[in-house]
Image (cartoon, rainbow, N blue to C red):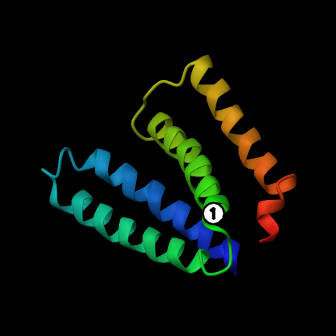
Amino acid sequence: MNYVYLAGAIVFEVIGTSALKASAGFAKLWPTLLMAICFAAALFCLSQTLRTIPLGIAYAIWCGVGIILTALSGWLVFRQSIDAAAIAGMALIIAGVLVINLVSRSVAE
């Protein structure tokens, strides 16, 4: 269940961040409300995750996957470009998350 909550936290955070972009600086009501609800849900799910997964591990996964999914959302939904340097950076993030989960002894804490 730990990683289900973590996945939920990531999904809510990405939707909330996309809604933040769509809110045009809080000028649009519905995207602003969606953003607030999603951020609250993301923090709730993250708090449940932290009951069993170490803070550093959960946050690394949350941030790493969130960055990649948010960049993909920007590309797909808002038609923002992603260049080769951004792709390389995201590959390094994925590598870092994999190292933390597959090699680090912190995961077992």
Horizontally, is 100 left or right of 65 in the view?
right
Please give left or right for residue 107 compared with residue 80 in the image. right
Which residue ends up furthest to the left in the rendered image? 27
Relative depth, front residue between 103 and 64: 103
Q: Which image quadrant for residue 50?
A: bottom right
- Residue under pointer 1: 58
- Residue located 38% across and 67% down the image: 38
Tell me the amino acid under the disc marked 1: Ala
Residue 71 shown left or right of residue 98 in the figure:
left
Residue 21 location (% of width, % of height): 30, 45
Which image quarter is the N terminus in? bottom right
In the picture, which quadrant includes the C terminus? bottom right
Residue lying at the far top of the rendered structure: 84
The residue that appears at 26% across and 57% down in the rendered structure is: 31
User: Residue at horizontal 53%, vertical 71%?
Assistant: 46
User: Which of the pair 54/43 is nearer the observer?
Assistant: 54
**Position in image of residue 54 (x %, y %):** 66, 69
Give the structural element (helix, strand or loop) at label 1.
helix
Q: Vertically, is 87 above or below 104? A: above
Q: Please provide percent x and percent y for residue 106.
A: 77, 62
